[in-house]
Image: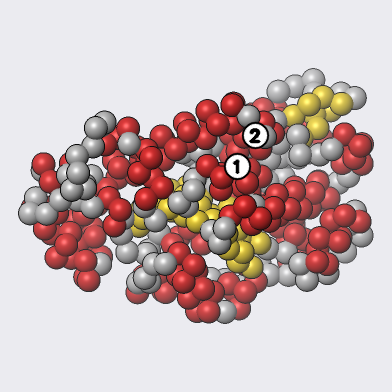
Amino acid sequence: MAAFHRIRSEPLDIPLENASGLLDSIPLTFVMGCPRSGTTFLLRCLAELPRTRSFAGTLIPDRLCHVIANAGPSPLADDILYSCRAVLWKTFVTSILSRGYHLRCAVREPRHAWSAARTLLGWSPLAVEEFGMVYKEPFLAMAAVSFIRHFTGARFVHLIRDGRDCADSLERTYGTALSDPVLDARGSRWREVGSEIGVGRERDGKILPWWVPDEHGQRFLDSSRYERYLWLWSECVRRAKESEKVASGRYLEVRYEELCAEPRNTGERLLRFLGLEGSRRYWKTLRSVRSTSVGIGGMTSRGDAWEPIANMLRELGYA
């Protein structure tokens, strides 16, 4: 299987698995957005694109995104980002060197069956740049600027959903994450189940997430879980949107509501942005989107949101 180790016409001066700089030369896509925004569904869709490897959550842990964001531009953040790059690259290379992967390609992608067969038989070298990678981690949103500046060849898809729907879903499914018992500084629960906190500091016996300013700390601690999740949503959206200023056309916003209402149009816009071709499986998965969760946050009166969050909801057309 020697052909699997010839990926370019010129030889590499280091082992392929260490050549993480090549990550900037492949179609690399990051999917981000507040948890419960539909990022998992979007990853399922993009995973069906031809010659695309998809991964979620474990290669760049959610809490590491908080650490990078909290560190800001610094040698520590740079070291972490280069470590993330190495992990992503080694995982990608290992996956496309798998015979099983190319066998599945030959079966699932008729248009690429002959190319996959030639690679399997060792008749042609493997061109790494012809394969793409999609990585989904919602909390990349918190450190989006750092990731966009580091991964200069990557594209970033930011999925935005009505903050009230996100908060409602988070409260029901992630109920303990920002609860009072978890925020109690006398214990270590926030380190065990606090993926939404990531990095915290103590204030009056409570743990305050790094993304809550000191001057608003007491208001956050006095808020309900639903309001805290709204706060989390607003920070994810605000920080991810800030990255557009440095993205140079590599950032795309997708509304979850538009994805539900017009999957075909949204799917075409995604393909144009990524510069990739669709597939029968891609379109089939897109059509399976369910709109039943749209508007759930408005089903029960929750009172008025804190003014800065209410302003963001209005600016995005959600209130």
Q: Mark 2 and 1 residues: CB-CB less than 8 Å, in contact?
A: yes
User: Which residue was labeled with disc 2?
Assistant: 73
Q: Is residue 55 left or right of residue 141?
A: left
Residues at marks 2 and 1, CA–CA distance in whole angstroms: 7 Å
User: Which residue was labeled with disc 1?
Assistant: 146
What's the residue type where badge 1 is placed?
A: Ser
* Residue 267 seen: no
For numbered disc 2, what is the local secondary structure?
Answer: loop
Q: Quadrant of the N terminus?
A: top left
What's the residue type where badge 2 is placed?
A: Pro
* Residue 188 seen: yes
Q: Residue 187 at what x, y percent from top left?
A: 75, 22
Residue depicted at x 49% and y 45%: 151
The numbered disc on residue 38 is none
Q: In this rendering, is residue 119 above or below 194?
A: below
* Sequence order check, earlier mark of 2 and 1: 2
Q: Residue 311 at what x, y percent from top left?
A: 86, 61
Q: Is residue 10 left or right of residue 18?
A: left
Q: In this rendering, is residue 70 above or below 32?
A: above
Residue 218, quarter of picture: top right
Residue 305, quarter of picture: bottom right
Residue depicted at x 50% and y 79%: 264
Q: Quadrant of the C terminus?
A: bottom right
Residue depicted at x 59% and y 26%: 76
Residue depicted at x 52% and y 35%: 81
Q: How many marks?
A: 2
